Every structure is written in C-alpha cells, then in structure tokens.
C-alpha cells in the first residue's frame, strides 16, 4: 500500500459511511419525534397514498355518522309529535262515543262538539309547526328525507325515509289543482340532456305566459335554473334519487286559483302529476272533519273516521320506528367501519416504537463509531512525516 497525502481514501470511505448512518439516524429521530413511519412521500409513496385515502374515507364516515344522528333526531321529533296526535285522536274518539248517546239533546251534544272541533285545530297546529332542520315533517310538504350514510356516490350510500301528512283535514286554501307538479318521466342524472332545443312555456294562475328557451343538449339542471331565474312565481327543483330524477314545479302562492298550466313543452318531460304531498293535502290528511258531532249519526260516523285516522298514524309511526332502527343499524356498521379504517391507516402510517428505538440506538452507535473512525482516518497522512524525519 502506497503512502500518499493528497488523497485520503480511508477518510473518504469513512466519511461516506458516516453520511449514510447520519441520514438513517435523522430518519429514526424524525419517526420517533413525529410518531409516524411515513412522514413524506419519499418514505413510502404507495403507503402514503393508501393511508391518505383511508384517512379521507374515515373523515367522510364521521360526517355520515353525524348525518345518521341527525336523521334519528328528525324521526324522533316526528314520532313524538305523532304520539301527541294519537293521544288527541284517542280523546276525540272518547268524545265521539259520548256524543253518540241518544239521550243527549243538541245543547248537551254541543259541549262534546266544541272540544272535538278544538282538538282538530290542535292536530293541524301540531302538523304545521313540527319541523326539523327547517323541514316540516308532518304537514305533507316534505315527502321524504334522504340521509347520506356512506362515503361514496351511490344509491346504497343514501337512505330515504318517507314522511306522512298527519293533519286532521284540509285547511283553508288547500289545493285541488296542480299547484305542485312532478314529471312522470325521469333521467338517470340531473346533468343529462332533456331537450333537443326549443321552448318550455307555462302560466301561473291564468297570468301571462312565461318562456324558457332551451338550447340543444340542455340538461335538467339547466331547465331548473332557467325556470327559477324567471321569477315567475314558480320554484323548480330536481326531484328523486340517484338514477331516477324528475323535475318538480311548485307555485309560490298556495291556494286554489294559483295552479300551474304548461302551454308549450319541448322537453322529454311531457306528463306531469300532483306530488304525493298535494294528493295527501287534497285528500284531507287524517280525514277528520269538524262539526261532525252535531248529531248521534254524525258522532257514529266520526268513530269510523277516528279508527281510520288511528290506523294512518300507527302506520306512520311504524315507518318512523323501522327507519330509526335501520339508521341505528347503519350507524353501528359505520362505527365498525370507521374503527377498521383507522386501524388500517395506523398500520401503514404509524411508527412501531419498539422497532424504531432499536434502529435509533443502532444508528446512534454507528454515527459515534463513524465519527471516531473518521478522526483516525484523517490522521493517517501524518505517518508520511516519519519518512521525512
């Protein structure tokens, strides 16, 4: 081996090895101080991608869990209000049975009739004021609530819950004409084309014709937006569930005489019917009418109406209870899924401290040893001085 002083190969080898072990020590320190095995894409690019996806899904699941809790709360509000209506209808049955007694004169029967009529008003008041999140849940204006209970865009990630109109009877101005209209035809997606070009024209309450021009390939979203931009007293919206969307038109002014009439239509939506809520309003909800206890025969007829009304209420509460149980089951499943996603992310992202501390100790010793060896390697050229002395 030759003795040289210009190039210290031993020192450079020691320096290279020291740089490698110092880099490994830095990684160990970073993992131990952060608690993560993957701190950047350079640590594990594929693992980081999977971990970030799992984290994103976990956060979506947390939002869906809150959605389910809101849904359960809405159903509880509707169910408790329906329970109060059940108590009122039961009392009305008691009043009707009392008023059916043949020994009562008109004055005596009027006492029962007065309370009966007041209770009908209270049922309507409860139905009109019971709401959750700004939605009326018992007066028929909201047909269903759709809960988002997943973390993807699919029909299985949405859970619709039907609502029932539980008012006693039609209130003044309840419509018997199409002031709410939903198309029979549907499209799979609101972004699908609904016209090859042309006009959509309508009147409200016999007023002037309102016109919307649709270009070639105009979508359902375009149609809804254009109608709403007219300010013509009609609110348009997209109705339905994924894969089955229709257009809904609602007159902004309730009451007979404000119905919508379509005068020209170049869209695929050629047939319109009243919404389920409109049908329920026109049918009179529970079918309970005031001033029916003025005679024994009327009281007997009221007993039949009350029995039918109780069945409607019980059917509604059965749906609320079943939907609540389904939401609870979905909640339990999401909680388990969330836990599993968190565990999967942890296995990818989190540092194993038992392993990392062993690596840290090894790298620390290697850096100390490398530093010592580098110091000795730097002094090797001094041996040349012995030849010159």
Image: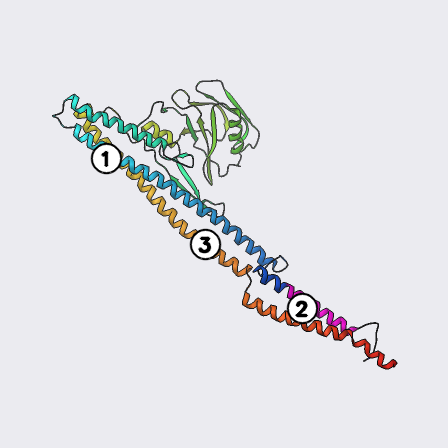
**Residue 11 covered by magenta stretch:** yes
The residues bearing labels 1 and 2 have C-alpha atoms spaced at a distance of 83 Å
Side of 323 where 196 appears, left or right:
right
Residue that lies at the very extreme toward the front in this rendered image: 389
| Location of residue 141 (image quadrant) | top left
Nearer to me, 104 or 277: 104
Side of 308 where 274 appears, left or right:
right
Q: Which secondary structure lies at badge 3?
A: helix
Q: Which residue is mark 1?
A: 90
**Image coordinates for residue 2, horizontal then vertical, percent:** 83, 79
Q: Which residues are magenta?
A: 8-26
Question: Looking at the image, is mark 3 or mark 1 earlier in the sequence?
Answer: 1
**Image coordinates for residue 231, horizontal then vertical, percent:** 51, 24
Question: Where's the C terminus, which quadrant?
Answer: bottom right
**Image coordinates for residue 120, horizontal then vertical, percent:** 28, 28
Neighbor class of circle 2 (other Cα within 10 Å; few <14, some 14-19, many 20+) is many
**Residue 59 covered by magenta stretch:** no
Nearer to me, 327 or 83: 83
* Residue depicted at 50% across the width and 49% down the height: 59
* Above/below status of 74 relative to 275: below
The residues bearing labels 3 and 2 have C-alpha atoms spaced at a distance of 41 Å
Q: Which residue is mark 3?
A: 337
Question: Looking at the image, is mark 1 or mark 2 earlier in the sequence?
Answer: 2
* Residue depicted at 58% across the width and 63% down the height: 32
Asked whether disc 3 touches disc 1, contact meaning CB atoms under 8 Å apart, the reply is no
* Residue depicted at 16% across the width and 25% down the height: 296
Asked whether disc 1 touches disc 2, contact meaning CB atoms under 8 Å apart, the reply is no
Q: Which residue is mark 2?
A: 21
Nearer to me, 289 or 180: 289
The residues bearing labels 3 and 1 have C-alpha atoms spaced at a distance of 44 Å
């Amino acid at each position: 081996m030759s003795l040289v002083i210009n190039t210290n190969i031993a020192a450079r080898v020691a320096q290279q090895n020291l740089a490698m072990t110092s880099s490994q020590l830095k990684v160990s320190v970073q993992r131990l101080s952060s608690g993560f095995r993957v701190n950047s894409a350079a640590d594990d690019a594929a693992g980081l991608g999977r971990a970030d996806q799992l984290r994103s899904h976990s956060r979506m699941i947390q939002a869906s869990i809150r959605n389910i809790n809101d849904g359960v709360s809405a159903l509880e509000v509707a169910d408790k209000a329906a329970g109060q209506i059940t108590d009122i209808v039961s009392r009305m049955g008691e009043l009707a049975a009392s008023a059916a007694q043949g020994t009562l004169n008109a004055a005596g029967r009027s006492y029962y009739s007065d309370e009966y009529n007041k209770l009908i008003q209270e049922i309507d008041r409860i139905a009109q004021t019971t709401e959750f999140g700004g939605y009326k849940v018992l007066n028929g204006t909201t047909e269903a609530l759709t809960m988002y209970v997943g973390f993807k865009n699919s029909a299985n990630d949405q859970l619709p819950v039907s609502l029932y109109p539980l008012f006693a009877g039609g209130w003044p101005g309840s419509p018997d004409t199409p002031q709410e209209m939903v198309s029979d035809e549907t499209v799979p997606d609101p972004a699908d084309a609904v016209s090859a070009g042309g006009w959509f024209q309508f009147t409200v309450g016999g007023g002037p014709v309102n016109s919307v021009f649709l270009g070639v390939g105009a979508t359902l979203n375009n149609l809804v937006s254009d109608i709403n931009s007219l300010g013509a007293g009609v609110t348009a919206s997209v109705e339905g569930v994924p894969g089955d969307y229709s257009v809904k038109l609602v007159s902004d002014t309730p009451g007979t005489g404000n119905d919508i009439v379509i005068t020209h239509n170049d869209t695929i939506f050629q047939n319109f019917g009243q919404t389920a809520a409109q049908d329920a309003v026109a049918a009179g909800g529970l079918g309970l009418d005031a001033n029916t206890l003025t005679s024994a025969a009327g009281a007997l007829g009221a007993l039949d109406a009350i029995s039918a009304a109780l069945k409607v209420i019980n059917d509604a509460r059965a749906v609320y209870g079943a939907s609540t149980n389904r939401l609870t089951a979905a909640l339990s499943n999401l909680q388990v899924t969330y836990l599993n996603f968190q565990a999967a992310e942890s296995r990818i992202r989190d540092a194993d401290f038992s392993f990392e501390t062993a690596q840290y100790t090894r790298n620390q010793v290697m850096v100390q040893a490398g530093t010592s060896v580098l110091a000795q390697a730097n002094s090797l050229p001094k041996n040349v001085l012995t030849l010159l002395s």
